[in-house]
Protein backbone atom coordinates (compact mmCIF):
# COMPACT_ATOMS: atom_id res chain seq x y z
CA UNK A 1 0.00 0.00 0.00
CA UNK A 2 2.74 2.48 0.91
CA UNK A 3 4.58 1.69 -2.33
CA UNK A 4 1.47 2.71 -4.24
CA UNK A 5 1.39 5.99 -2.31
CA UNK A 6 5.02 6.70 -3.17
CA UNK A 7 4.38 5.84 -6.81
CA UNK A 8 1.45 8.26 -6.76
CA UNK A 9 3.65 11.01 -5.34
CA UNK A 10 6.29 10.45 -8.03
CA UNK A 11 3.62 10.71 -10.71
CA UNK A 12 2.76 14.18 -9.37
CA UNK A 13 6.31 15.57 -9.48
CA UNK A 14 6.16 17.19 -12.95
CA UNK A 15 2.98 19.08 -12.02
CA UNK A 16 4.39 20.06 -8.61
CA UNK A 17 7.52 21.42 -10.26
CA UNK A 18 5.41 23.30 -12.81
CA UNK A 19 3.54 25.00 -9.94
CA UNK A 20 6.66 26.00 -7.97
CA UNK A 21 6.57 29.60 -9.22
CA UNK A 22 2.85 29.78 -8.48
CA UNK A 23 3.48 28.60 -4.91
CA UNK A 24 6.00 31.41 -4.45
CA UNK A 25 3.63 33.98 -5.91
CA UNK A 26 0.69 32.84 -3.75
CA UNK A 27 2.88 32.33 -0.67
CA UNK A 28 1.00 29.07 -0.04
CA UNK A 29 0.94 25.73 -1.83
CA UNK A 30 -1.67 25.79 -4.62
CA UNK A 31 -4.89 24.03 -3.69
CA UNK A 32 -4.52 21.77 -6.72
CA UNK A 33 -1.25 20.37 -5.37
CA UNK A 34 -2.66 19.83 -1.88
CA UNK A 35 -5.69 18.03 -3.33
CA UNK A 36 -3.57 15.78 -5.54
CA UNK A 37 -1.22 14.90 -2.68
CA UNK A 38 -4.19 14.17 -0.44
CA UNK A 39 -5.61 11.81 -3.07
CA UNK A 40 -2.41 9.73 -3.00
CA UNK A 41 -2.90 9.14 0.73
CA UNK A 42 0.48 10.64 1.59
CA UNK A 43 -0.81 12.92 4.35
CA UNK A 44 -2.03 9.77 6.19
CA UNK A 45 1.35 8.01 5.96
CA UNK A 46 2.07 8.06 9.72
CA UNK A 47 -1.57 8.12 10.88
CA UNK A 48 -2.98 5.17 12.87
CA UNK A 49 -4.74 2.48 10.85
CA UNK A 50 -7.66 2.60 13.25
CA UNK A 51 -8.36 6.10 11.91
CA UNK A 52 -7.82 5.38 8.23
CA UNK A 53 -4.05 5.87 8.19
CA UNK A 54 -1.23 3.74 6.83
CA UNK A 55 1.08 3.45 9.87
CA UNK A 56 3.85 3.50 7.28
CA UNK A 57 7.60 3.21 7.65
CA UNK A 58 9.19 6.61 8.46
CA UNK A 59 11.98 5.85 5.99
CA UNK A 60 9.40 5.61 3.19
CA UNK A 61 7.80 8.82 4.44
CA UNK A 62 11.12 10.64 4.30
CA UNK A 63 11.84 9.19 0.87
CA UNK A 64 8.58 10.67 -0.45
CA UNK A 65 9.40 14.07 1.05
CA UNK A 66 12.90 13.98 -0.46
CA UNK A 67 11.46 13.24 -3.90
CA UNK A 68 8.93 16.09 -3.67
CA UNK A 69 11.71 18.48 -2.63
CA UNK A 70 13.49 17.73 -5.90
CA UNK A 71 10.48 19.31 -7.62
CA UNK A 72 9.44 22.07 -5.18
CA UNK A 73 10.96 22.70 -1.76
CA UNK A 74 7.95 24.56 -0.36
CA UNK A 75 5.61 21.74 -1.32
CA UNK A 76 7.98 19.20 0.25
CA UNK A 77 8.15 21.25 3.45
CA UNK A 78 4.37 21.19 3.71
CA UNK A 79 4.22 17.49 2.84
CA UNK A 80 6.74 16.84 5.59
CA UNK A 81 5.21 18.82 8.44
CA UNK A 82 1.54 18.10 7.70
CA UNK A 83 2.29 14.39 7.41
CA UNK A 84 4.29 14.09 10.62
CA UNK A 85 1.65 15.71 12.83
CA UNK A 86 -0.73 12.72 12.79
CA UNK A 87 2.11 10.74 14.37
CA UNK A 88 1.97 13.04 17.39
CA UNK A 89 -1.83 13.12 17.47
CA UNK A 90 -1.62 9.33 17.85
CA UNK A 91 0.12 9.92 21.22
CA UNK A 92 -2.74 12.04 22.59
CA UNK A 93 -5.61 10.65 24.62
CA UNK A 94 -8.05 8.84 22.33
CA UNK A 95 -10.69 11.49 23.06
CA UNK A 96 -8.52 13.98 21.17
CA UNK A 97 -7.89 11.52 18.33
CA UNK A 98 -11.62 10.95 17.99
CA UNK A 99 -12.24 14.71 17.85
CA UNK A 100 -9.68 15.14 15.06
CA UNK A 101 -10.37 12.07 12.91
CA UNK A 102 -13.73 10.67 14.04
CA UNK A 103 -15.73 12.47 11.37
CA UNK A 104 -12.93 13.07 8.86
CA UNK A 105 -9.81 10.87 8.64
CA UNK A 106 -8.38 13.38 6.13
CA UNK A 107 -8.13 16.16 8.72
CA UNK A 108 -4.85 18.10 8.51
CA UNK A 109 -3.01 19.71 11.43
CA UNK A 110 -0.37 22.45 11.45
CA UNK A 111 1.86 23.42 14.37
CA UNK A 112 4.07 25.93 16.16
CA UNK A 113 5.96 24.33 19.02
CA UNK A 114 8.07 27.15 20.44
CA UNK A 115 6.49 27.98 23.84
CA UNK A 116 5.62 31.57 23.03
CA UNK A 117 2.11 31.23 24.47
CA UNK A 118 0.99 30.83 28.07
CA UNK A 119 -1.22 28.23 29.70
CA UNK A 120 -2.65 28.48 33.22
CA UNK A 121 -3.92 25.46 35.14
CA UNK A 122 -7.66 25.47 35.76
CA UNK A 123 -10.35 22.90 36.57
CA UNK A 124 -10.30 20.10 34.00
CA UNK A 125 -7.66 21.68 31.81
CA UNK A 126 -5.92 24.92 30.96
CA UNK A 127 -6.55 28.49 29.86
CA UNK A 128 -4.36 29.09 26.81
CA UNK A 129 -3.51 32.39 25.13
CA UNK A 130 -0.77 33.93 23.01
CA UNK A 131 0.76 34.27 19.58
CA UNK A 132 2.84 31.69 17.74
CA UNK A 133 4.94 32.17 14.60
CA UNK A 134 5.89 29.96 11.66
CA UNK A 135 2.89 27.61 11.45
CA UNK A 136 3.70 26.11 8.05
CA UNK A 137 0.70 24.98 6.03
CA UNK A 138 -1.80 26.46 8.48
CA UNK A 139 -4.06 27.60 5.63
CA UNK A 140 -4.46 23.94 4.63
CA UNK A 141 -5.22 22.73 8.17
CA UNK A 142 -8.25 22.76 10.47
CA UNK A 143 -6.44 21.98 13.73
CA UNK A 144 -3.19 23.24 15.24
CA UNK A 145 -0.60 21.97 17.73
CA UNK A 146 0.83 24.76 19.91
CA UNK A 147 3.62 24.71 22.48
CA UNK A 148 3.23 26.64 25.73
CA UNK A 149 4.68 26.84 29.21
CA UNK A 150 2.19 25.87 31.92
CA UNK A 151 1.83 28.07 35.01
CA UNK A 152 0.16 27.19 38.29
CA UNK A 153 -1.97 29.54 40.42
CA UNK A 154 1.16 31.02 41.98
CA UNK A 155 2.65 31.90 38.60
CA UNK A 156 5.27 29.15 38.69
CA UNK A 157 6.14 27.14 35.58
CA UNK A 158 5.09 23.53 36.15
CA UNK A 159 5.23 21.99 32.66
CA UNK A 160 5.83 22.49 28.95
CA UNK A 161 2.98 21.09 26.90
CA UNK A 162 1.63 20.79 23.39
CA UNK A 163 -1.97 21.98 23.07
CA UNK A 164 -4.36 20.80 20.37
CA UNK A 165 -6.96 23.32 19.15
CA UNK A 166 -9.66 23.26 16.43
CA UNK A 167 -9.82 26.01 13.80
CA UNK A 168 -12.61 27.97 15.50
CA UNK A 169 -10.37 28.61 18.51
CA UNK A 170 -7.53 30.42 16.74
CA UNK A 171 -6.87 33.14 14.18
CA UNK A 172 -4.34 33.06 11.34
CA UNK A 173 -2.36 36.26 10.75
CA UNK A 174 -0.97 36.58 7.20
CA UNK A 175 2.60 37.72 7.81
CA UNK A 176 4.64 35.37 5.59
CA UNK A 177 6.59 37.76 3.36
CA UNK A 178 10.02 36.16 2.99
CA UNK A 179 12.76 35.34 0.47
CA UNK A 180 12.90 31.57 0.96
CA UNK A 181 10.32 28.80 1.38
CA UNK A 182 7.82 31.42 0.28
CA UNK A 183 5.19 28.85 -0.62
CA UNK A 184 4.95 27.35 2.86
CA UNK A 185 2.49 29.95 4.17
CA UNK A 186 4.17 29.83 7.58
CA UNK A 187 1.92 32.41 9.17
CA UNK A 188 1.21 33.41 12.78
CA UNK A 189 -1.38 31.76 15.01
CA UNK A 190 -3.18 33.94 17.56
CA UNK A 191 -5.27 32.56 20.42
CA UNK A 192 -7.41 34.72 22.65
CA UNK A 193 -7.82 33.08 26.06
CA UNK A 194 -9.53 29.74 25.52
CA UNK A 195 -10.12 26.59 27.55
CA UNK A 196 -8.26 23.44 26.49
CA UNK A 197 -9.30 20.16 28.19
CA UNK A 198 -6.64 17.88 29.67
CA UNK A 199 -7.23 15.25 26.97
CA UNK A 200 -6.18 17.76 24.30
CA UNK A 201 -2.74 18.33 25.80
CA UNK A 202 0.50 16.36 25.79
CA UNK A 203 3.45 16.98 28.11
CA UNK A 204 6.81 17.36 26.41
CA UNK A 205 8.35 15.51 29.35
CA UNK A 206 6.23 12.51 28.35
CA UNK A 207 7.15 12.71 24.68
CA UNK A 208 10.78 13.15 25.74
CA UNK A 209 10.64 9.68 27.29
CA UNK A 210 8.83 8.19 24.27
CA UNK A 211 5.46 8.02 26.03
CA UNK A 212 1.95 9.23 25.30
CA UNK A 213 -1.47 8.06 26.53
CA UNK A 214 -2.42 7.24 22.93
CA UNK A 215 -0.01 4.30 23.00
CA UNK A 216 -2.70 2.40 24.89
CA UNK A 217 -4.74 2.21 21.68
CA UNK A 218 -2.03 2.74 19.04
CA UNK A 219 0.33 -0.12 19.84
CA UNK A 220 2.49 -0.08 16.71
CA UNK A 221 6.25 0.29 17.19
CA UNK A 222 5.95 3.41 15.04
CA UNK A 223 4.54 5.33 18.01
CA UNK A 224 7.40 4.32 20.34
CA UNK A 225 10.06 6.26 18.45
CA UNK A 226 11.50 9.49 19.92
CA UNK A 227 9.54 12.62 19.10
CA UNK A 228 12.61 14.75 18.47
CA UNK A 229 14.25 12.17 16.22
CA UNK A 230 11.23 12.04 13.93
CA UNK A 231 10.40 15.73 14.00
CA UNK A 232 13.87 17.15 13.44
CA UNK A 233 14.45 14.71 10.58
CA UNK A 234 11.16 15.97 9.16
CA UNK A 235 12.85 19.38 8.86
CA UNK A 236 16.20 18.24 7.44
CA UNK A 237 14.77 15.85 4.83
CA UNK A 238 13.36 18.57 2.53
CA UNK A 239 16.75 20.31 2.60
CA UNK A 240 18.56 17.13 1.59
CA UNK A 241 15.97 16.70 -1.17
CA UNK A 242 16.71 20.24 -2.37
CA UNK A 243 20.37 19.30 -2.63
CA UNK A 244 19.54 16.27 -4.78
CA UNK A 245 17.41 18.49 -7.01
CA UNK A 246 20.13 21.14 -7.25
CA UNK A 247 22.67 18.46 -8.17
CA UNK A 248 20.46 17.13 -10.99
CA UNK A 249 19.85 20.60 -12.44
CA UNK A 250 23.49 21.64 -12.13
CA UNK A 251 24.72 18.55 -13.99
CA UNK A 252 22.13 19.04 -16.74
CA UNK A 253 23.03 22.72 -17.14
CA UNK A 254 26.78 22.08 -17.28
CA UNK A 255 26.40 19.47 -20.01
CA UNK A 256 25.10 22.15 -22.40
CA UNK A 257 26.89 25.21 -21.00
CA UNK A 258 29.59 26.94 -23.04
CA UNK A 259 31.83 29.33 -21.09
CA UNK A 260 32.28 32.36 -23.35
CA UNK A 261 34.80 33.93 -20.98
CA UNK A 262 37.06 30.90 -21.49
CA UNK A 263 37.18 30.85 -25.30
CA UNK A 264 34.02 28.82 -25.66
CA UNK A 265 35.16 25.98 -23.42
CA UNK A 266 32.48 23.39 -22.69
CA UNK A 267 31.81 23.45 -18.95
CA UNK A 268 31.50 19.67 -18.82
CA UNK A 269 35.16 19.36 -19.91
CA UNK A 270 36.42 21.49 -17.02
CA UNK A 271 38.25 19.08 -14.65
CA UNK A 272 37.50 21.33 -11.68
CA UNK A 273 33.77 21.13 -12.49
CA UNK A 274 34.03 17.34 -12.41
CA UNK A 275 35.71 17.44 -9.01
CA UNK A 276 33.05 19.80 -7.65
CA UNK A 277 30.14 17.53 -8.52
CA UNK A 278 31.98 14.50 -7.15
CA UNK A 279 32.47 16.24 -3.81
CA UNK A 280 28.94 17.67 -3.73
CA UNK A 281 27.37 14.34 -4.64
CA UNK A 282 29.28 12.54 -1.89
CA UNK A 283 28.23 15.11 0.73
CA UNK A 284 24.57 14.82 -0.27
CA UNK A 285 24.66 11.02 -0.22
CA UNK A 286 26.37 11.08 3.18
CA UNK A 287 23.70 13.41 4.57
CA UNK A 288 20.95 11.08 3.43
CA UNK A 289 22.62 7.80 4.40
CA UNK A 290 23.61 8.84 7.93
CA UNK A 291 20.23 10.39 8.65
CA UNK A 292 18.25 7.37 7.49
CA UNK A 293 20.58 4.79 9.05
CA UNK A 294 20.16 6.39 12.46
CA UNK A 295 16.37 6.19 12.21
CA UNK A 296 16.70 2.53 11.20
CA UNK A 297 18.88 1.88 14.26
CA UNK A 298 16.18 3.36 16.50
CA UNK A 299 13.52 1.27 14.77
CA UNK A 300 15.55 -1.89 15.30
CA UNK A 301 15.85 -1.24 19.04
CA UNK A 302 12.13 -0.58 19.36
CA UNK A 303 11.34 -3.77 17.44
CA UNK A 304 13.45 -5.72 19.95
CA UNK A 305 11.67 -4.08 22.85
CA UNK A 306 14.82 -2.28 23.96
CA UNK A 307 15.14 1.28 25.22
CA UNK A 308 16.78 3.72 22.82
CA UNK A 309 19.93 4.99 24.59
CA UNK A 310 20.53 8.69 24.95
CA UNK A 311 23.78 8.34 22.99
CA UNK A 312 21.89 7.19 19.89
CA UNK A 313 19.27 9.90 20.25
CA UNK A 314 22.02 12.50 20.43
CA UNK A 315 23.71 10.87 17.43
CA UNK A 316 20.46 11.25 15.50
CA UNK A 317 20.53 14.95 16.25
CA UNK A 318 24.25 15.23 15.46
CA UNK A 319 23.87 13.71 12.01
CA UNK A 320 20.54 15.43 11.36
CA UNK A 321 21.93 18.96 11.81
CA UNK A 322 25.13 18.08 9.96
CA UNK A 323 23.02 16.49 7.23
CA UNK A 324 21.26 19.81 6.73
CA UNK A 325 24.61 21.58 6.73
CA UNK A 326 26.16 19.15 4.25
CA UNK A 327 23.20 19.59 1.92
CA UNK A 328 23.33 23.38 2.11
CA UNK A 329 27.08 23.44 1.55
CA UNK A 330 26.60 21.25 -1.52
CA UNK A 331 23.88 23.55 -2.85
CA UNK A 332 26.18 26.55 -2.33
CA UNK A 333 28.97 24.83 -4.28
CA UNK A 334 26.68 23.86 -7.14
CA UNK A 335 24.97 27.25 -7.32
CA UNK A 336 28.25 29.17 -7.34
CA UNK A 337 29.64 26.94 -10.08
CA UNK A 338 26.57 27.14 -12.34
CA UNK A 339 27.14 30.50 -13.96
CA UNK A 340 24.78 33.36 -14.62
CA UNK A 341 21.99 31.22 -16.03
CA UNK A 342 21.30 29.85 -12.56
CA UNK A 343 20.22 33.34 -11.44
CA UNK A 344 17.23 33.43 -13.76
CA UNK A 345 13.76 33.39 -12.26
CA UNK A 346 12.15 30.00 -12.69
CA UNK A 347 15.33 27.97 -12.35
CA UNK A 348 15.36 25.31 -9.68
CA UNK A 349 18.88 26.20 -8.53
CA UNK A 350 18.25 29.76 -7.42
CA UNK A 351 15.07 28.71 -5.64
CA UNK A 352 16.82 25.79 -3.93
CA UNK A 353 19.58 28.13 -2.79
CA UNK A 354 17.07 30.51 -1.21
CA UNK A 355 14.85 27.78 0.20
CA UNK A 356 17.72 25.78 1.73
CA UNK A 357 19.07 28.82 3.55
CA UNK A 358 15.56 29.61 4.78
CA UNK A 359 15.28 26.06 6.13
CA UNK A 360 18.68 26.39 7.75
CA UNK A 361 17.40 28.93 10.29
CA UNK A 362 14.74 26.57 11.69
CA UNK A 363 15.43 25.71 15.34
CA UNK A 364 15.76 22.03 14.44
CA UNK A 365 18.87 22.93 12.42
CA UNK A 366 20.72 24.67 15.27
CA UNK A 367 24.05 22.99 14.54
CA UNK A 368 26.13 24.19 17.48
CA UNK A 369 23.52 23.32 20.12
CA UNK A 370 23.06 19.78 18.81
CA UNK A 371 26.79 19.18 18.49
CA UNK A 372 27.47 20.60 21.95
CA UNK A 373 24.95 18.18 23.49
CA UNK A 374 26.55 15.24 21.71
CA UNK A 375 30.09 16.21 22.65
CA UNK A 376 29.20 16.97 26.27
CA UNK A 377 27.58 13.55 26.62
CA UNK A 378 30.65 11.87 25.10
CA UNK A 379 32.81 13.58 27.73
CA UNK A 380 30.56 12.20 30.45
CA UNK A 381 28.80 15.44 31.33
CA UNK A 382 25.11 15.66 32.16
CA UNK A 383 23.07 16.82 29.20
CA UNK A 384 20.10 19.04 29.99
CA UNK A 385 16.78 18.01 28.42
CA UNK A 386 16.50 19.45 24.95
CA UNK A 387 15.73 18.60 21.38
CA UNK A 388 17.06 15.06 21.32
Image (tube, rainbow, N blue to C red):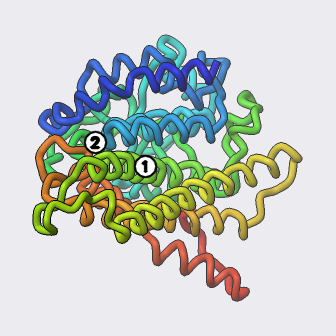
Image x and y of residue 73, in percent: 33, 43
- Residue located beneath label 1 in the image: 244
Which circle marks residue 294 in the picture?
none
Mark 2 or 1, nearer chain start = 2
> Measured along the vertical axis of the image, is residue 376 above or below residue 4?
below
Give the secondary structure at mark 1.
Answer: helix
The answer, for residue 372, to whether it is visible in the render is yes
Q: Residue at x 28, y 35 (%)?
A: 170
In which image quadrant can residue 265 be found? bottom left
Q: Residue furthest top?
A: 103
Image x and y of residue 186, in percent: 26, 44
In this image, 62 relative to 308: left or right?
A: left
Q: Residue at x 23, y 26 (%)?
A: 30
Front residue of this view, candidates 36 and 107: 36
Which circle marks residue 191 in the picture?
2
C-beta proximity under 8 Å, tags 2 and 1: no
> Measured along the vertical axis of the image, is residue 3 above or below residue 147?
above
In this image, 103 relative to 248: left or right?
A: right
Q: Quadrant of the N terminus?
A: top right
Amino acid sequence: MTNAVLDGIRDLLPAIRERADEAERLRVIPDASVKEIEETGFFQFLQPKRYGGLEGDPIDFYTGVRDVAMACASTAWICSVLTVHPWQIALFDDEAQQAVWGDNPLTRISSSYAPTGKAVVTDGGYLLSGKWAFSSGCDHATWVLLGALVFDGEGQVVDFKTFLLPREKYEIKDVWNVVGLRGTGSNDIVVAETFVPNAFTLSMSDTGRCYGPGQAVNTSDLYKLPFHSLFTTTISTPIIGMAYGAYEEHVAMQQTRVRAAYAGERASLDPFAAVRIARAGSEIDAAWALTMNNIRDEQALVARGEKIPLKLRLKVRRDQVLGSQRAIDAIDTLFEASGGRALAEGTYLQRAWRDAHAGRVHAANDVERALQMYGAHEFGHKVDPGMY
